[in-house]
Protein backbone atom coordinates (compact mmCIF):
# COMPACT_ATOMS: atom_id res chain seq x y z
CA UNK A 1 0.00 0.00 0.00
CA UNK A 2 1.34 3.47 -0.83
CA UNK A 3 2.31 5.80 1.98
CA UNK A 4 -0.35 8.03 3.54
CA UNK A 5 0.24 11.31 5.38
CA UNK A 6 -1.46 12.54 8.53
CA UNK A 7 -2.55 16.11 7.87
CA UNK A 8 -3.50 18.94 10.24
CA UNK A 9 -5.23 22.09 8.98
CA UNK A 10 -5.02 25.10 11.30
CA UNK A 11 -7.76 27.56 10.32
CA UNK A 12 -10.02 24.71 9.17
CA UNK A 13 -13.17 26.85 9.30
CA UNK A 14 -11.69 29.75 7.32
CA UNK A 15 -11.88 30.56 3.62
CA UNK A 16 -8.48 29.05 2.82
CA UNK A 17 -8.89 26.10 5.22
CA UNK A 18 -12.18 25.06 3.61
CA UNK A 19 -10.63 25.31 0.15
CA UNK A 20 -7.67 23.20 1.30
CA UNK A 21 -9.99 20.30 2.09
CA UNK A 22 -11.57 20.59 -1.36
CA UNK A 23 -8.18 20.61 -3.10
CA UNK A 24 -6.83 17.69 -1.06
CA UNK A 25 -9.92 15.75 -2.16
CA UNK A 26 -9.68 16.80 -5.82
CA UNK A 27 -5.98 15.95 -5.96
CA UNK A 28 -6.55 12.62 -4.29
CA UNK A 29 -3.88 13.63 -1.79
CA UNK A 30 -2.88 10.56 0.24
CA UNK A 31 -4.40 11.72 3.54
CA UNK A 32 -4.27 9.26 6.43
CA UNK A 33 -5.63 10.92 9.57
CA UNK A 34 -7.09 14.41 9.18
CA UNK A 35 -6.96 16.89 12.07
CA UNK A 36 -9.00 20.09 11.48
CA UNK A 37 -8.08 22.82 14.00
CA UNK A 38 -9.60 26.22 14.71
CA UNK A 39 -10.37 28.47 17.67
CA UNK A 40 -12.27 27.31 20.76
CA UNK A 41 -15.49 28.73 19.31
CA UNK A 42 -15.42 26.20 16.45
CA UNK A 43 -14.33 23.18 18.49
CA UNK A 44 -16.87 20.38 18.11
CA UNK A 45 -18.21 21.61 14.76
CA UNK A 46 -17.65 19.30 11.79
CA UNK A 47 -16.14 19.53 8.34
CA UNK A 48 -16.77 17.09 5.53
CA UNK A 49 -13.84 15.33 3.92
CA UNK A 50 -14.01 12.50 1.39
CA UNK A 51 -17.62 11.80 2.35
CA UNK A 52 -16.89 11.60 6.08
CA UNK A 53 -17.62 14.08 8.82
CA UNK A 54 -14.55 15.06 10.85
CA UNK A 55 -14.68 16.98 14.16
CA UNK A 56 -12.89 20.31 14.43
CA UNK A 57 -10.66 20.53 17.50
CA UNK A 58 -9.32 23.55 19.34
CA UNK A 59 -5.77 24.58 18.50
CA UNK A 60 -3.73 24.31 21.70
CA UNK A 61 -0.05 23.96 22.51
CA UNK A 62 -0.46 20.23 23.11
CA UNK A 63 -2.91 19.30 20.35
CA UNK A 64 -0.16 17.85 18.14
CA UNK A 65 1.28 15.64 20.90
CA UNK A 66 1.12 11.95 20.04
CA UNK A 67 -0.91 12.61 16.86
CA UNK A 68 1.90 11.71 14.46
CA UNK A 69 1.07 14.58 12.10
CA UNK A 70 3.25 14.62 8.96
CA UNK A 71 2.05 17.87 7.37
CA UNK A 72 0.47 20.85 9.16
CA UNK A 73 -1.06 23.57 6.99
CA UNK A 74 -1.36 26.87 8.91
CA UNK A 75 -3.87 29.43 7.70
CA UNK A 76 -5.21 31.24 10.75
CA UNK A 77 -3.20 34.47 10.71
CA UNK A 78 0.39 35.44 11.47
CA UNK A 79 0.05 35.64 15.25
CA UNK A 80 -1.32 32.08 15.41
CA UNK A 81 1.57 30.76 13.31
CA UNK A 82 4.02 32.73 15.46
CA UNK A 83 2.70 31.04 18.57
CA UNK A 84 1.76 27.51 17.50
CA UNK A 85 3.85 26.46 14.47
CA UNK A 86 6.71 25.41 16.73
CA UNK A 87 4.53 22.84 18.51
CA UNK A 88 3.66 21.23 15.17
CA UNK A 89 7.35 21.18 14.19
CA UNK A 90 8.41 19.78 17.58
CA UNK A 91 5.90 16.97 17.13
CA UNK A 92 7.65 16.02 13.87
CA UNK A 93 5.46 17.70 11.25
CA UNK A 94 6.53 19.90 8.37
CA UNK A 95 4.61 23.18 8.62
CA UNK A 96 3.36 24.74 5.38
CA UNK A 97 2.53 28.25 6.51
CA UNK A 98 0.16 30.48 4.60
CA UNK A 99 0.72 33.60 6.70
CA UNK A 100 3.37 36.28 6.35
CA UNK A 101 5.00 35.35 9.65
CA UNK A 102 7.96 33.26 8.39
CA UNK A 103 8.19 34.44 4.79
CA UNK A 104 11.22 36.69 5.01
CA UNK A 105 13.07 34.53 7.55
CA UNK A 106 16.30 33.66 5.72
CA UNK A 107 16.21 30.08 7.05
CA UNK A 108 12.69 29.45 5.78
CA UNK A 109 12.11 28.58 2.11
CA UNK A 110 9.45 30.70 0.39
CA UNK A 111 8.08 28.59 -2.40
CA UNK A 112 5.97 28.65 -5.54
CA UNK A 113 6.58 25.08 -6.74
CA UNK A 114 6.50 25.93 -10.46
CA UNK A 115 9.11 28.68 -9.91
CA UNK A 116 11.58 27.63 -7.18
CA UNK A 117 10.88 24.00 -6.18
CA UNK A 118 14.58 23.48 -5.36
CA UNK A 119 14.27 25.80 -2.34
CA UNK A 120 12.05 23.24 -0.58
CA UNK A 121 15.21 21.27 0.28
CA UNK A 122 16.02 23.86 2.99
CA UNK A 123 12.86 22.93 4.94
CA UNK A 124 14.87 20.90 7.47
CA UNK A 125 16.50 24.02 8.92
CA UNK A 126 13.31 25.12 10.67
CA UNK A 127 10.66 22.55 9.70
CA UNK A 128 8.70 25.35 8.01
CA UNK A 129 7.99 26.10 4.35
CA UNK A 130 6.30 29.46 3.71
CA UNK A 131 3.56 30.10 1.19
CA UNK A 132 4.03 33.54 -0.40
CA UNK A 133 1.53 36.39 -0.43
CA UNK A 134 -1.36 35.75 -2.83
CA UNK A 135 -0.58 38.70 -5.12
CA UNK A 136 3.07 37.69 -5.29
CA UNK A 137 2.30 34.08 -6.27
CA UNK A 138 0.32 34.91 -9.39
CA UNK A 139 2.79 37.61 -10.42
CA UNK A 140 5.91 35.42 -10.16
CA UNK A 141 4.11 32.67 -12.11
CA UNK A 142 3.86 35.16 -14.99
CA UNK A 143 7.33 36.68 -14.48
CA UNK A 144 9.33 33.45 -14.37
CA UNK A 145 8.72 32.40 -18.01
CA UNK A 146 9.59 35.93 -19.13
CA UNK A 147 12.78 35.91 -17.05
CA UNK A 148 13.67 32.54 -18.62
CA UNK A 149 13.03 34.02 -22.08
CA UNK A 150 14.85 37.34 -21.76
CA UNK A 151 17.43 36.60 -19.06
CA UNK A 152 17.12 39.78 -17.07
CA UNK A 153 14.32 41.91 -15.64
CA UNK A 154 15.28 45.49 -14.81
CA UNK A 155 12.12 46.36 -12.92
CA UNK A 156 8.44 45.54 -12.49
CA UNK A 157 5.62 48.00 -11.89
CA UNK A 158 2.34 46.46 -10.78
CA UNK A 159 -1.10 47.67 -9.77
CA UNK A 160 -3.32 45.07 -8.14
CA UNK A 161 -7.10 44.78 -8.10
CA UNK A 162 -7.52 42.52 -5.08
CA UNK A 163 -10.69 40.67 -4.18
CA UNK A 164 -12.33 40.75 -0.75
CA UNK A 165 -11.42 37.06 -0.23
CA UNK A 166 -7.94 38.29 0.66
CA UNK A 167 -9.41 39.40 3.98
CA UNK A 168 -10.90 35.95 4.61
CA UNK A 169 -14.54 35.01 4.98
CA UNK A 170 -15.37 38.19 6.85
CA UNK A 171 -14.12 40.24 3.90
CA UNK A 172 -16.40 38.45 1.44
CA UNK A 173 -19.34 38.64 3.84
CA UNK A 174 -18.82 42.38 4.28
CA UNK A 175 -19.08 42.99 0.54
CA UNK A 176 -22.25 40.88 0.25
CA UNK A 177 -23.84 42.55 3.25
CA UNK A 178 -23.08 46.04 1.96
CA UNK A 179 -24.56 45.20 -1.46
CA UNK A 180 -27.71 43.93 0.27
CA UNK A 181 -27.80 47.16 2.29
CA UNK A 182 -27.41 49.16 -0.92
CA UNK A 183 -30.48 47.52 -2.46
CA UNK A 184 -32.36 48.09 0.81
CA UNK A 185 -31.42 51.81 0.61
CA UNK A 186 -29.45 51.60 3.86
CA UNK A 187 -25.86 51.48 2.68
CA UNK A 188 -25.23 54.66 4.72
CA UNK A 189 -25.84 52.69 7.91
CA UNK A 190 -23.84 49.63 6.79
CA UNK A 191 -20.95 48.68 9.05
CA UNK A 192 -17.42 48.09 7.88
CA UNK A 193 -15.02 46.00 9.95
CA UNK A 194 -12.97 43.90 7.54
CA UNK A 195 -11.98 46.98 5.52
CA UNK A 196 -11.20 50.50 6.66
CA UNK A 197 -13.79 51.99 4.26
CA UNK A 198 -16.98 50.88 2.54
CA UNK A 199 -15.97 48.29 -0.08
CA UNK A 200 -19.27 47.98 -2.01
CA UNK A 201 -19.26 50.27 -5.07
CA UNK A 202 -15.83 51.55 -4.09
CA UNK A 203 -12.10 50.87 -4.51
CA UNK A 204 -9.67 51.26 -1.63
CA UNK A 205 -6.03 52.10 -2.47
CA UNK A 206 -4.68 50.63 0.75
CA UNK A 207 -4.13 47.01 1.76
CA UNK A 208 -2.46 46.38 5.11
CA UNK A 209 -0.72 49.01 7.22
CA UNK A 210 1.40 51.94 6.00
CA UNK A 211 5.20 51.71 6.01
CA UNK A 212 7.31 54.83 6.48
CA UNK A 213 8.42 54.84 2.81
CA UNK A 214 4.92 55.73 1.58
CA UNK A 215 4.08 52.15 0.56
CA UNK A 216 1.89 49.67 2.45
CA UNK A 217 3.00 46.39 4.04
CA UNK A 218 1.13 44.45 1.31
CA UNK A 219 3.02 46.37 -1.39
CA UNK A 220 6.37 45.71 0.29
CA UNK A 221 5.48 42.01 0.55
CA UNK A 222 5.31 41.92 -3.25
CA UNK A 223 8.67 43.71 -3.48
CA UNK A 224 10.56 41.61 -0.94
CA UNK A 225 9.01 38.23 -1.66
CA UNK A 226 9.52 38.46 -5.44
CA UNK A 227 13.28 38.77 -5.06
CA UNK A 228 13.44 35.91 -2.54
CA UNK A 229 11.37 33.55 -4.73
CA UNK A 230 13.00 34.44 -8.05
CA UNK A 231 16.47 34.20 -6.51
CA UNK A 232 17.57 37.40 -8.23
CA UNK A 233 17.06 41.03 -7.35
CA UNK A 234 14.05 42.29 -9.27
CA UNK A 235 12.97 45.81 -8.27
CA UNK A 236 9.18 45.70 -7.87
CA UNK A 237 7.08 48.80 -7.23
CA UNK A 238 3.50 47.88 -6.32
CA UNK A 239 0.24 49.72 -5.76
CA UNK A 240 -2.19 47.36 -4.02
CA UNK A 241 -5.88 48.15 -4.31
CA UNK A 242 -8.94 46.43 -2.84
CA UNK A 243 -11.86 46.15 -5.27
CA UNK A 244 -15.45 44.95 -4.76
CA UNK A 245 -14.84 41.48 -6.22
CA UNK A 246 -15.57 38.34 -4.19
CA UNK A 247 -12.54 36.30 -5.14
CA UNK A 248 -9.69 36.27 -7.71
CA UNK A 249 -7.11 39.00 -7.85
CA UNK A 250 -6.21 40.87 -11.04
CA UNK A 251 -2.93 42.64 -11.71
CA UNK A 252 -1.73 45.10 -14.35
CA UNK A 253 1.97 44.26 -14.63
CA UNK A 254 4.62 46.24 -16.51
CA UNK A 255 7.93 44.45 -17.01
CA UNK A 256 11.06 46.31 -18.08
CA UNK A 257 13.82 44.14 -19.53
CA UNK A 258 17.46 45.07 -20.28
CA UNK A 259 17.82 47.92 -22.82
CA UNK A 260 19.06 45.47 -25.47
CA UNK A 261 15.87 43.34 -25.34
CA UNK A 262 13.30 43.75 -28.10
CA UNK A 263 10.12 42.16 -26.86
CA UNK A 264 8.61 39.69 -29.34
CA UNK A 265 4.96 39.26 -28.45
CA UNK A 266 4.49 35.84 -30.05
CA UNK A 267 7.57 34.50 -28.24
CA UNK A 268 6.41 36.03 -24.96
CA UNK A 269 2.89 34.57 -25.28
CA UNK A 270 4.33 31.16 -26.13
CA UNK A 271 6.71 31.22 -23.15
CA UNK A 272 3.87 32.20 -20.83
CA UNK A 273 1.46 29.61 -22.21
CA UNK A 274 4.05 26.82 -22.04
CA UNK A 275 4.74 27.51 -18.38
CA UNK A 276 3.19 25.08 -15.90
CA UNK A 277 -0.27 26.16 -14.68
CA UNK A 278 -0.19 29.41 -16.69
CA UNK A 279 -2.57 29.99 -19.60
CA UNK A 280 -2.65 32.85 -22.09
CA UNK A 281 -6.11 34.19 -22.93
CA UNK A 282 -5.52 37.07 -25.21
CA UNK A 283 -7.67 38.34 -28.04
CA UNK A 284 -8.66 41.94 -27.49
CA UNK A 285 -10.55 42.18 -30.81
CA UNK A 286 -12.87 39.41 -29.67
CA UNK A 287 -13.07 40.65 -26.08
CA UNK A 288 -11.12 37.67 -24.79
CA UNK A 289 -9.00 38.31 -21.70
CA UNK A 290 -8.82 36.97 -18.15
CA UNK A 291 -11.28 38.22 -15.57
CA UNK A 292 -12.07 37.19 -11.99
CA UNK A 293 -15.23 35.35 -13.11
CA UNK A 294 -13.07 33.21 -15.41
CA UNK A 295 -10.28 32.46 -12.92
CA UNK A 296 -12.49 31.74 -9.92
CA UNK A 297 -12.54 28.08 -8.86
CA UNK A 298 -9.59 27.21 -11.10
CA UNK A 299 -5.94 26.42 -10.42
CA UNK A 300 -4.67 28.38 -13.42
CA UNK A 301 -2.97 31.77 -13.56
CA UNK A 302 -4.42 33.49 -16.64
CA UNK A 303 -2.50 36.10 -18.63
CA UNK A 304 -3.96 38.45 -21.21
CA UNK A 305 -3.64 41.96 -22.70
CA UNK A 306 -0.01 41.07 -23.47
CA UNK A 307 1.36 44.03 -25.35
CA UNK A 308 4.51 45.91 -26.13
CA UNK A 309 4.99 49.36 -24.69
CA UNK A 310 4.17 52.06 -27.23
CA UNK A 311 7.40 53.93 -26.47
CA UNK A 312 10.04 51.35 -25.57
CA UNK A 313 10.86 47.98 -27.18
CA UNK A 314 12.16 46.50 -23.91
CA UNK A 315 8.89 46.95 -21.98
CA UNK A 316 5.96 44.52 -21.90
CA UNK A 317 2.57 45.03 -20.27
CA UNK A 318 0.21 42.23 -19.22
CA UNK A 319 -2.91 41.51 -17.18
CA UNK A 320 -2.67 38.58 -14.75
CA UNK A 321 -5.67 37.01 -12.99
CA UNK A 322 -5.87 34.07 -10.56
CA UNK A 323 -8.14 32.72 -7.86
CA UNK A 324 -6.72 34.19 -4.67
CA UNK A 325 -8.07 31.46 -2.39
CA UNK A 326 -6.76 28.65 -4.60
CA UNK A 327 -3.68 29.68 -6.65
CA UNK A 328 -2.84 32.44 -4.14
CA UNK A 329 -3.17 30.21 -1.09
CA UNK A 330 -4.63 26.70 -0.82
CA UNK A 331 -3.56 25.25 -4.17
CA UNK A 332 -0.03 26.57 -3.77
CA UNK A 333 0.13 25.05 -0.28
CA UNK A 334 -1.00 21.64 -1.57
CA UNK A 335 1.45 21.87 -4.48
CA UNK A 336 4.22 22.58 -1.95
CA UNK A 337 3.19 19.47 -0.01
CA UNK A 338 3.18 17.36 -3.19
CA UNK A 339 6.64 18.65 -4.21
CA UNK A 340 7.92 18.10 -0.68
CA UNK A 341 6.82 14.46 -0.84
CA UNK A 342 8.36 14.06 -4.31
CA UNK A 343 11.69 15.75 -3.52
CA UNK A 344 12.14 14.15 -0.15
CA UNK A 345 11.20 10.80 -1.66
CA UNK A 346 9.16 10.08 1.42
P1 LIG B 1 -12.64 30.19 13.91
O1 LIG B 1 -13.64 30.04 12.79
O2 LIG B 1 -12.82 29.21 15.01
O3 LIG B 1 -12.50 31.63 14.39
P2 LIG B 1 -10.60 33.53 7.65
O4 LIG B 1 -9.23 33.79 7.10
O5 LIG B 1 -11.57 33.05 6.62
O6 LIG B 1 -11.10 34.70 8.43
O7 LIG B 1 -10.42 32.32 8.70
C1 LIG B 1 -9.56 32.38 9.81
C2 LIG B 1 -9.36 30.97 10.40
O8 LIG B 1 -8.45 31.09 11.49
C3 LIG B 1 -10.62 30.35 10.94
O9 LIG B 1 -10.61 28.96 10.73
C4 LIG B 1 -10.50 30.68 12.42
O10 LIG B 1 -11.21 29.80 13.28
C5 LIG B 1 -9.03 30.47 12.63
N1 LIG B 1 -8.60 31.12 13.87
C6 LIG B 1 -8.77 32.41 14.25
N2 LIG B 1 -8.30 32.60 15.49
C7 LIG B 1 -7.83 31.41 15.93
C8 LIG B 1 -7.21 30.95 17.13
N3 LIG B 1 -6.98 31.76 18.16
N4 LIG B 1 -6.86 29.64 17.22
C9 LIG B 1 -7.08 28.80 16.19
N5 LIG B 1 -7.66 29.18 15.01
C10 LIG B 1 -8.03 30.46 14.89
Image (cartoon, rainbow, N blue to C red):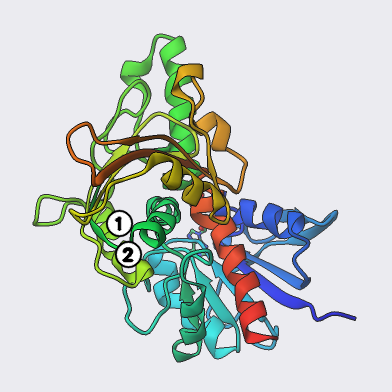
Residue 303: give x, y in percent of width and height: 46, 40
Helix, strand, or loop for circle 2?
helix
The residue located at (59%, 74%) in the rendering is: 72
Q: Is residue 289 above or below residue 55?
A: above
Res. 20 in view: yes
Front-most of 342 and 32? 342
Q: Which numbered tag is attached to residue 225? A: 2
Instruction: Write the residue at 62% across / 81% down.
Output: 343
Badge 2: few (under 14), some or many (20 or more) residues near its Cα, within 10 Å? many
Instruction: Report whether 304 appears left or right of 37.
Output: left
Q: Residue at x 53, y 67 (%)?
A: 113
**Location of mark 1 (residue):** 222
Residue at x-position 24% and y-position 36% = 309
Assign the C terminus to one quadrant of the image: bottom right
The answer to which quarter of the image holds residue 21 is bottom right
In this view, the residue in front, 39 or 289, is 289
Q: Quadrant of the N terminus?
A: bottom right
Nearer the observer, 336 or 20: 336
Report if residue 159 is visible in the image: no
Above or below residue 93? Residue 312 is above
Kindly indicate whether the residue at mark 1 contacts the one at mark 2 (C-beta within 8 angstroms): yes
Amino acid sequence: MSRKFNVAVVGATGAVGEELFRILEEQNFPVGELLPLASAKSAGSEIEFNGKRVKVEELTESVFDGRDIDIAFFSAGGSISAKYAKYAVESGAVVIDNTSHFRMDSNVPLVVPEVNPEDIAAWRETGVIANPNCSTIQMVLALKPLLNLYGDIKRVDVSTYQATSGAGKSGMEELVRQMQDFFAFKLDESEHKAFSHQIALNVIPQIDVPIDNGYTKEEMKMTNETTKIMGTNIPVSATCVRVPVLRSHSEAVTVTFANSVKVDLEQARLALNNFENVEVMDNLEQGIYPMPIIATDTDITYVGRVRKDIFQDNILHMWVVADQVRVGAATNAVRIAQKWIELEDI
